[in-house]
Amino acid sequence: MDVGTVAICMVTHNSEGDLRGCLESVAALRYRPLELVVVDCASNDGSVAAVTQHPPPELPLVHRALSENTGFAGGMNEALAQTDAPWVLTLNPDARPDPDYISHLLERATRHPEFRVGALAGRLVRPQQADETRLLDACGMFLSPTWRHFDRGSGEPATGSWTRADRVFGATGAASLFRREALDDVAVEREVFLSEFHSFREDAELCFRLQERGWEVLYEPSALCEHRRHNLPSRRRQMPPHVNMHSLKNRYLLRLYHQNGMNLLLTGVPALLRDVAAFAYVLLRERSSLEAYGWLWQHRREIRRRRRAIRSQRTVTSSTINRWFFRKGLPL
């Protein structure tokens, strides 16, 4: 099956420890033609050397080293600017796709000409721990009425669940396949991933724009990928303060950019209760994240302008978007 070149786009930041295994998995992918684009965001370890000195053999490589850490969003935008491939696999350095990962995702896309398939999510599992049941990491993304987004199956045993292909709200940026036409269609002021998100929730925000333009996201359970996830809610206290700040800030940005009037009626109360709880936690336990509220106020005019730009591109009804707050998937 050949539907054109697939560009594997990676963003690295102090990722030396993960890169060797990831690059070996990329080299073992069976689908061709492939190309690799890696953007490093101001690493101070050996990430740059790990890529340039040990690239996957026989794969075209474009490598860019940035002088500042622009986050996943900025780094991925730079990577996308380096390729015009019709399909893009966003891949985290801590991910290890199986050899047929891309092939299974593309096969699922070609089965459904009735849908405008904009993205595909595989079945991500966490690394096997000795004498423990293997756990799922992500099987597509879903939304809750509190305006939180979750990875389906996260932390559940990897046997016997989420085995049916279906339509989902979104796909994690850790290892998902995107149609380039869809990414270009939903870009805002030439940005696919919005730079103000920097890191955390930028993939969920992109999936909102895909859904708002009528692009479908499909989940394919036969596409397997190992993902050693660093950021989990249970590890919040161990995460760097700037990561937690961006996480809080971006939760409000999602709503400011995408909440509509009908959704406010449907989710206003649970979302407000969640807001109160979040503010209390930050005030009492994580004061370094108070900066998020100041950032939102300081950038209020820019936020309003971005919201208008995003809303002007919407082509589907509010009810089409709102259904995703109450369903984890839809049948194919």
Image (cartoon, rainbow, N blue to C red):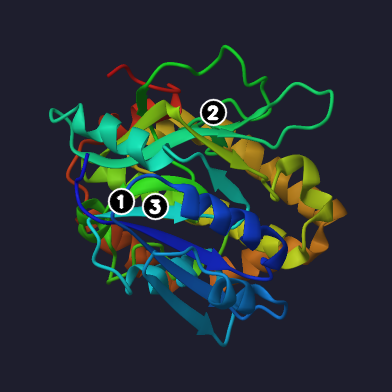
The number of numbered badges drawn on the structure is 3
Residue furthest front in the image: 58
Camera-side residue: 125 or 185?
Answer: 125
The three-letter code of the residue at mark 2 reads Arg
Q: In percent of the image, x 32 and y 49: which residue is there?
A: 178
How far across and down, in percent of the image, does residue 264 sit? Answer: 42, 37
The three-letter code of the residue at mark 1 reads Arg
Q: Mark 2: which secondary structure?
A: loop
Horizontally, is 255 left or right of 155 in the view? left
Please name which of the two marks, 1 or 2, marks the residue nearer to the observer. Answer: 1
Up/down of 154 relative to 230, above or below: above
Q: Earlier in the sequence, mark 3 or mark 1?
A: 1
Residue furthest bottom in the image: 67
How far across and down, in percent of the image, does residue 234 sit? Answer: 78, 40
- Which residue is label 3 attached to? 89
Is the residue under label 2 in contact with that under label 1 (CB below 8 Å)?
Answer: no
- Which residue is label 2 attached to? 152
Please name which of the two marks, 3 or 2, marks the residue nearer to the observer. Answer: 3
Q: Mark 3: which secondary structure?
A: strand
Residue 78's image quarter?
A: bottom left
Q: In percent of the image, x 65 and y 38: which residue is there?
A: 274
Q: Earlier in the sequence, mark 3 or mark 2?
A: 3
Q: Earlier in the sequence, mark 1 or mark 2?
A: 1
Up/down of 213 relative to 189, above or below: above
